[in-house]
Amino acid sequence: MTASKYFSAALRRKHPSPHARLPLSPASTEKTLKLHDLVLFGIGGALGSGLFLLTGRAARDLAGPAVTMSFAVAAMACLFSALSYAEMSSRLPNSGGAYSFSYAGLGELPAFLVGMCLTLEYGVSAAAIARSWASYLADAVPFLPSWATGVDSQFSFLAFLLVAALSVVLAMGMREAKWVINISTILYALIVFIIIGFGSFNVDPSNWNPFLPFGFKGVIAASSAIFFSYVGFDEIATMSEEAIDAARTVPLAIILSMLAVTGMYIASSLILTGLVNYSQLNIDAPFSVAFRSVGLPLVARIVAIGTALGMTNTAAVSLAAQPRIFLSMGRDGLLPRTFARSTRTSTLLCGAIVSLLAAVVETQELADVVSGGTLLAFLATNVTLLLTRTRIHSQTSKVPTVIYSFVVASALCGLFNKLAASKALPSWIFMVVAIPACLVPALMLLFSEFEGGEDVERSPPAFLCPLVPLVPLFGTFTTCFLLFQLSQKALTALCSWLIVSSAAYFMYGAHNALLANEYLILHESPGDGSYNSFDDLAMEANSIASETPSDEILASPQETVEDP
């Protein structure tokens, strides 16, 4: 493969069509998830991880009582991306989530990298949650040995056991697993209401003074750190192929779960910093230790046990989402075909990897890297929505260039802000250079022919993001800005992960992608477009290639491989 062919392969885009992908097996495509299932799935995926894993550290070391503002800022940044996710999920209701969105909008290599970022978001976050779950269990059951909980040890057997057990349950199928997730989410929500209810009668308002001990810089830094808290709403998109009326229910579930989680985060964090002075917060188990310090040991024990239950649920949601990303990548040919054959195989394989990771890696070493991967996935979704709307409505080819310029300018804005905060650059550079660099392309985009084209969408999706391009522009800016507020160690680890992922793509994905076979993509398959296996799909491609004249293939409107 020459360099030019590699470049073309990296940027070829997958036109969305049911014939362009290998569907799930009939057993796993049974549509069993209703709107309430999806909402509980999103709440369960987000609520435990951020509230009990990161709130203590963010309040004590970064923002103080103003951590409530940090949750609001992170929620606003997520809301912009959530609206973009909602529209793209309505346009492409399949199990790939942001990976599938990126494949249709950005290209093959960006999609592969987004898929690997989602692996950080789902698989690695499940390991982080399992590790924290073991720590909370140690607080609830003090006689457990350290080698089991990992509190004073590098190894955590309980974290390993949790991931392994959940993987086995999820491998049985979503019809059975959804009941486990729904019940545990409801029970966990009751624990949160107990925190808010009992805590509201025991807060000391003096603990909120000073409210901004680290200034607004601390609020922004904490917002980036707790962005991991909102991981969950995007996991709903991976359940699209198993959702009833996915084009309508998935976007609605994303918005509803996002609003519910935000309210509970803000209220709970306000109670936490009111119970105990922020400087005295326990990082590993902030809520249970705080209740014990105000003379409520029974509530503290209930909170500790309930937290372990909630984290079990959060880990289960992440472990449910991860195999579906690999399955989508596998049936597109970007990962080995084993992942495309069965969700059960993919679930067990992912579970084995994540369980080993949970056993030996410390939680905080994972959290910031996970946040970085999440931010990149959100960034890709916002940009994809902008490009999708541009290709539908705009009559000028200059708009995509302006969009990419805005992404670069937003990244520079975040970088300059971080350098100015660390005194590496004077603060005036941030005001004079970075902010105008973002505003100019944004204004160009707003005054472009974004909505003025004559090409009207024939079949609009069930959900359309409001205020486009403002919402995805804000989503793009906030994700880029927050990305550069992460630690240098986390950014270095994230860059290393992307480099390794790129190498894997060029060594395997570029050669084995289904889009590499033009005949398969350009021609509509006969019948209902379903195949029993990956091999049947390849045989169909070869049959089309040998029987169909080239001029007929090129004239087919069904699918197009869009090279740069």
Image: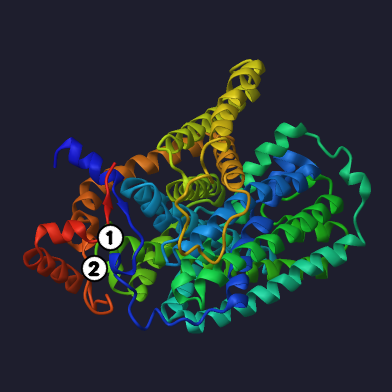
Residue 401 visible to an observer of this rendering: yes
> In terms of secondary structure, where does tag 2 sit?
loop
Asked whether the viewer can see residue 155, the reply is: no
- Real-space CA distance between mark 2 and mark 1, rounded to the nearest whole angstrom: 7 Å
Q: Residue furthest front?
A: 454
Mark 1 burial class by Cα count in 10 Å: few <14, some 14-19, many 20+:
many
Residue placed furthest toward the left: 546
- Above or below, 43 relative to 533: above
- Residue located 66% across and 18% down the image: 427
Name above or below for residue 439 compared with residue 496: above
Quarter in which the N terminus is drawn: top left
Q: Residue at x 68, y 48 (%)?
A: 76
Toward the viewer: 123 or 429?
Answer: 429
Residue at (48%, 52%) from the top-left corner? Answer: 361
The numbered disc on residue 346 is none
Amino acid type, mark 1:
Glu
Observer-nearest of 262 and 528: 528
For the residues labelled 2 and 1, say whether their Cβ atoms are less than 8 Å apart. Answer: yes
For label 2, the crowd category at 10 Å Cα-Cα, with few meaning under 14, some 14 to 19 and many 20 or more, is many
Indicate the position of residue 56 as horizontal and vertical percent values. 71, 50
Q: Which mark is residue 559?
A: 1
Q: Residue at x 60, y 29 (%)?
A: 439
Residue type for callout 2: Glu
- Please give the label number shown on residue 524: 2
Q: In which quadrant of the rendered view does residue 480 lie?
A: top right
Picture coordinates of residue 481, whole percent (x, y): 58, 36
Query: Does 57 sit left or right of 434 as displayed?
Result: right
Tag 1 or tag 2, which sits nearer the N-term?
Answer: 2
Q: Is residue 339 left or right of residue 177?
A: left
Question: Does residue 283 appear to the left or right of 88 in the view shown?
Answer: right
Q: Secondary structure at mark 1?
A: loop
